[in-house]
Image (spheres, grey):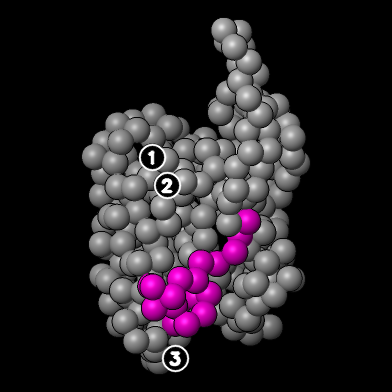
Amino acid sequence: MDLVFIVDDSGSMQEEQSNLAANFPKFVKVLNDYQTKSGSKLDWRVAVTTTGRDVDYNISPPIPFPIPLPPQSEKGDNGAFRQKKDCGSVRRWVERNDSNADQTFSCLAEVGTSGPSIEMPLESLKLALNDRVADGTNAGFLRPDALLAVVILTDEDDCSRQDNNFTIADDVCITMQGVKPVAEYKAMLDGVAGGANRWATAVIAGDKACTSGFGKAIDAQRLKQFVNLVGKNGMFSSICNGDLTTSLQDALSTFDAACKSFPGVK
């Protein structure tokens, strides 16, 4: 299994990242105990990137402000898988047989809160699996005989777009001009994985506007649309629960079902 975590690194995500880091050792134990259809141990690897890309934009609110808002310029990971020496990383992903694999991932999952305020998890995923593979940054991660499994963790919605120097009136992604249809990203993943039955996703985001122990989350309408398009290999879990334990268990159940129906090498 080739597992990619897209973690929101905007200013409101510290509690969620810490909870993910705390839960990951249990997540790893389930992966390590898993047996494939042939009875062998699961050969898994996991990578982490964030929801942000380099972006320049302007804000033009519908109600005039007393002073003009300055142009915004934000920097993101652009889909590059994270590698940190102080986390014990030896490459841009963690593998089953790495020493202290769970601790390394838990460290990598704490991606910080200084990322772009316009979250683009689906575009970040596209960059990770296309552009960053093509330029060598993430090369070697994807394997033709492995299920591609994607986990998206955010308290916002997906505002994925590919242009720059745009103007927005607010941060409501579902009505924002210029965002890419989520169907384009589903088709992209079908192509990267080699078919719709060769990848699965678990999205942990707001199923409504809510406040929990994690703070505030908005209704992730576009991400829910994305999961609905994926069908049986997709799962949406609410971040509003204030704890990721159940959500990660549900993600593993979804990936388990996808593994059992995985067609193997073409």
**Which residue is depicted at the point 72% across and 64% down?**
131
Q: Residue 38 carries which label?
A: 3
Q: Residues within 10 Å of mark 2 (few under 14, many from 20)?
A: some
Residue 257 pos. (x, y %)? 43, 69
Number of the label disc, if any, that sits on residue 113: 2
Work out whether 178 lies above or below 85. Answer: above
Q: Please name the amino acid that badge 2 sits on.
A: Thr
- Sequence order check, earlier mark of 3 and 2: 3
Q: Is residue 2 left or right of residue 62?
A: left
Disc 3: CA contacts within 10 A as few (<14), some (14-19) or many (>=20): few
The x, y position of residue 122, in whole percent, is 60, 51
Which of disc 1 and disc 3 is earlier in sequence?
A: 1
Give the vertical position of 235 relative to 263 (above or below): above
List x then y, in percent, for residue 167.
Answer: 70, 27
Q: Residue at x 30, y 31 (%)?
A: 211
Q: Does the magenta stretch include residue 84?
A: yes
Cβ–Cβ below 8 Å for labels 3 and 1? no
- The boundaries of the magenta stretch are 78-95
Tell me the element at label 3. Answer: loop
**CA gap, disc 3 and disc 2:** 42 Å
Q: In which quarter of the image is residue 29?
A: bottom left
